[in-house]
Amino acid sequence: MLSCPMKQWICTICFMFSSLFVSFGYSQNQLGEVSFDLGVFAFEDKDYESAQKNLLDAYHANPENPFFCHFLGKLYLTLEQLDRAENYLKKAYEINPVLHELEYDLAYLTFKRKNYQNAARQFIKIVENDPFTQNVPACYYAGISLFQCKKYQKAVDYLMRASRRSPSMQANCMFYCGICYYQINRPVDAARCFETVFMSATDPLKSYAKNWLVALRKKKLDKKKFDAFIKLSVNYDNNVMIVTPDLITGDEADQVLQCYLSGKYTWQWIPKHQIGLGMRHYQTFHQDLSEFDLTGSVIDLSYSYKLHEFTYKLNYSPSAYWLERYRYMFRHRMKASVYWPVIQDLTNFITYKYDIIENFNNELRDGNTHEFSMDLCYHIRKYHMKILAGFSAQNNQRKNLLYQYFEMTYRLEFIYKLMYNWKWQTSLNLHQRRYEIWEEMKRKDNRIDLSCSLSYSFLQDGLEIAIEYDYSKNNTTLDQLDPYDYRRNVFGISLKYYY
């Protein structure tokens, strides 16, 4: 049996060891809390490397602390390390399932895994359990998840809730609402949403909204039975001439007013078949050189048929031209074309034209032309740009061999949509014309046409104003043909209206 002094000594040692263990546990917990606070601060500053180090230190100090597990899961969710995020978030849920924002982070994890149906269910549950604030981020992601599930009407309900409660999220919410309305065939509501985004958002969302508005307007025009186009322009021409179908040059400068208008009525005959009837009118008024005033009127009869991804079109276009109010030329044009998408954003066009020409000033120029052309159009949506490239081959037959020729044309065009409804357009055409005979000598003409325009469109009412510049240079191998060796510059301002 132990003596009293021995008992006291043993009790003292036990007390000292127990105090040491308690002190060690307390210091470990305190160290974990400090590391956790440092990790949270680093996370909020987006210093994720430091946040990960401190949060792991906190976790290792106390692996059963639900706050440490939750924030580690939140960190890995931000870093797109979904498996790690799932491990820590689930552990936090097992320890404390009612932890603040834990349910939202688990729903967001489901969303990031693209399990949109379950994500929508989880976010909706969070929203309905919080009737006062309705958890705006949960509202937003509930709408996006429903959008991904193609439940567009229900998606609009949650996106609109988020939009009303958070001005900072309004643009994104309204953008997705616009797409939802488009999908459920409510184009007016869709346009209203995209207009809101266009007026309040910044790029790139602003540009996306503009593209949707233009597409909606184009679709509306496509569905209309009647469409029209009007253009008025004032130009300065330093070398007035008539280039179609044969060159007539004045070798003088003048100011020119150009008017162009067109209208077309289209109706659907039977499904996938359309018939169109239209008219185009063109007229120029020269300030001094009235003998170059040209008037042209064209009637356009068209038929189109869509078969799968191919669209086939036939056109017949009789046209009459007057030069200074006197009959100048009459032309019958038959055209057949087909176009189809080769791949996404790349469309191919193939066209054949046959013209019968009657020239009232010189019957030796009467004849016909055959023309074959192929063009490719590539839409680079990321940069709001279109590139068009193609070529055409024309065989021109006339009564007199002097006017017969074969011409190759190569085309390249860029259309670039700038910010704030501005658009830049540049085109380059190269022409190589070879005559069969010219007083027993071979004649070759090479022409370059360069066109540039900068335009601004008034999106809501179909108006467009543009500054335009055209340059032409023609070289001929026969030195004595001075009119056919020329340069031409045309500067102009135009106003256009689309209906």
Image: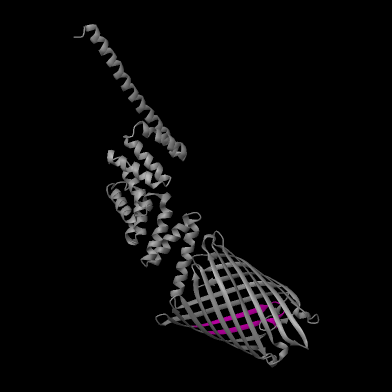
Where is residue 453 shown, x and y percent of the image? 62, 67
Count of numbered circles on the image:
0
x, y percent for residue 307: 44, 79
Q: Is residue 64 above or below residue 471?
A: above
Q: Residues in magenta?
A: 277-300
- Residue 95 shown in magenta: no
Find residue 30 and report its horizontal and vertical position in percent: 36, 27
Where 408 falls versus 463 (above or below)?
below
- Residue 175 location in percent, x, y? 42, 58
Mark yes or no: residue 290 visible: no
Identity of the residue drawn at 46% across and 63% down: 212
Q: Is residue 392 visible?
A: yes
Q: Is residue 284 magenta?
A: yes
Type of secondary structure dominating the magenta stretch: strand
The one nearer the camera, 187 or 380, is 380
Q: Quadrant of the N terminus?
A: top left
Q: In the image, is residue 183 above or below residue 260?
A: above
Q: Nearer the viewer, residue 243 or 105?
A: 105
Looking at the image, residue 225 sits to the left or right of residue 232; the answer is left
Q: Is 429 on the left-hand or right-hand side of 28?
A: right
